[in-house]
Amino acid sequence: MRYVRSDDHRHHFPNGELYGGELVRPFECPERWDFIVEALHDRGFRDIVDPLPLDDVRLAAVHDPDYLQFLSTAWRQWTDAGFTNDALPTVFPARGMSQVCPEHIDGKLGYYAFALETAITAGTWRAATASAAIAQTAQKLVTGGDRAAFALCRPPGHHAAADLYGGYCFLNNAALAASGFLADGAERVAILDVDFHHGNGTQSIFYDRADVLVLSLHGDPRHEFPHFLGHADERGRGPGVGFNVNYPMAPGTPFPVWSEALTDACRRIGEHGPEAIVVSLGVDTFEGDPISSFELRADDFTTYGRMIGRLGLPTVYIMEGGYAVEEIGHNTVNVLTGHLEAG
Amino acid sequence: MRYVRSDDHRHHFPNGELYGGELVRPFECPERWDFIVEALHDRGFRDIVDPLPLDDVRLAAVHDPDYLQFLSTAWRQWTDAGFTNDALPTVFPARGMSQVCPEHIDGKLGYYAFALETAITAGTWRAATASAAIAQTAQKLVTGGDRAAFALCRPPGHHAAADLYGGYCFLNNAALAASGFLADGAERVAILDVDFHHGNGTQSIFYDRADVLVLSLHGDPRHEFPHFLGHADERGRGPGVGFNVNYPMAPGTPFPVWSEALTDACRRIGEHGPEAIVVSLGVDTFEGDPISSFELRADDFTTYGRMIGRLGLPTVYIMEGGYAVEEIGHNTVNVLTGHLEAG
């Protein structure tokens, strides 16, 4: 399995994220990438592909033009306003308030953000676009004939909606890969999101579409981030009804329960009959993850990689979350290895 | 003019507010109160009234029961979740997301908050309810025959909606005073908000009502907090159409321009014919205010106090914002003095 990576991720690493009422070192840190690269190398994944230039037209098919304009200029607007720290939003358009984007950067940040762990830095746009290019390139490899490819994206993407950032995500890498498959001729695609957190951005981007089946296994949003999407009754809208499937699970969920949900998800993917699948691969379901509450063990990642591999479909793995930094590499590679064993 | 105050405000003072991407000492600090008390004393306002106990029934007429339940238990829920710093929200129900309150305190904070300068501490509920009691008591003084009274509220209130906190505000003191006048027999009331920032909470609480005329002079929300309400085209809803009047003004607005808006507001108050008025008195329109951008000078506060006094109406002044700490006392008392000169 080839994998796509770029050092450009290092341009994004905020000084702090808001957690527990204080600014702490972000759990989403560059060493995550290092540990994954090391584990890939150690376990024989050495066929590295550099990302192709980002296809802006395809990016604009996933994200709103005003949002992209904002993200690409936010740092300049922030520093022009006299601020020197990383940019964090301070005020949000809550229910009953106007949903119109203000002109001052302080208001714009709150208009486009939904969460506070996701600061914008001088290098955020560069890193986010590089990450998006990695996802696009991995999709191209699979469209071109590879049975599977791994996009080592950082920053992650599945929380980013058409015009919202948050949850460490700015551009939705998985959505880009899925829409890339469609643009290159596929009629049906599935996105399987196994990150601990609900892929609210991915869900919202495809919520009224029947050609992209979106399935997400995650911590129940009543108890877990992102808190405001990911309920079981969110099934899609209009022609998309039935093509969004959420599997919210309680804190402490162990692998036997989790894997039952995955079995059901795989069955639904089979019924959908996609030409390709995109896996939003977060390994924060791991029992040792510092900000998640599932109980998967290292071997479970191999097991479920096999389950996905047995679908026998062209597959792009997109790196999402996982914050038990020292274990993230092996857990990630366990999934990829399991996939190859089944293939 | 009698004034109502309580030392209980000292129970609320968070360690930090999010500003410019970092946690800084809150601009809304206890010394504000000290400087106002000192200026009142120095200039002969020595008739101090202790607040009566808070009337919970009247509080529940302004704020939703679930919101009050949240505010009164938020600190306990936060510490039960293992957090030790002041409580700040991290994730918000943005557009397109579910508007259902989660069960975890992290989600609840984001559901009920709209801004990040407003941390909840161990003593927040005590201070906020004391501040509300002060407003209620001042209203009672005026209902009882005082021509005017000053409620030295801290924390302030005009940004708090029926079920939202932010902008340093938890309970809407001005709304409590206005609804108190109605409950005590008035048929029509007016709220005049002269704080630099739009009184979004007050507007939203009375937005569909014709008995409470709400007028606000403030920095244009396209450029200034709270960014998502306060536009000139927000005129009320249903029977309330025409009973909400916003005067958004550009950064750098000087007193001659500002006072033209006040003249128009006073004309509208006269047309409304209220039995009493509530003034949301923020003095952050002052030229030296660190987080505002109008250009009023100390004498201008006296001048506009006279303009309000010339309305000849029973008046409750409710303390709101003002962050040029050393000048806040004299600017506040200038308004009260101007009022008395006209009366």
Image (cartoon, coloured by chain):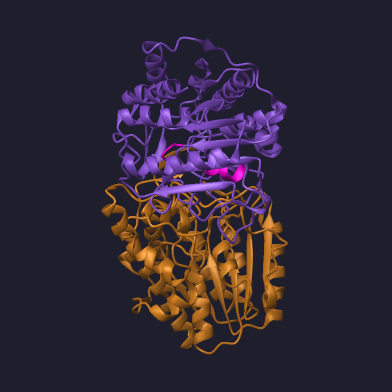
Chain colours: A orange, B purple
Residue B122 in sight: no
| Count of numbered badges drawn on the protein | 0
Q: Position of residue A63 (x, y in %)?
A: 47, 71
Would residue B203 be counted in the magenta stretch?
A: yes
Q: Residue at x 53, y 20 (%)?
A: B149
Where residue A188 sits, quadrant-wise, is bottom right
Answer left or right for B276 relative to B330.
right
Where does the magenta region start and end? B194-205
Would residue B122 be counted in the magenta stretch?
A: no
Q: Residue at x 63, y 20 (%)?
A: B140
Picture layout, residue B259 above or below residue A8: above
Q: Viewer-proximal residue, A306 or B261?
A: B261
Picture layout, residue B65 above or below residue A155: above
Q: Position of residue B229 (x, y in %)?
A: 50, 50
Q: Position of residue A192 (x, y in %)?
A: 60, 70
Q: Residue at x 49, y 58 (%)?
A: A321
Answer left or right for B259 relative to B126.
left
Q: Viewer-proximal residue, B208 or B98?
A: B208
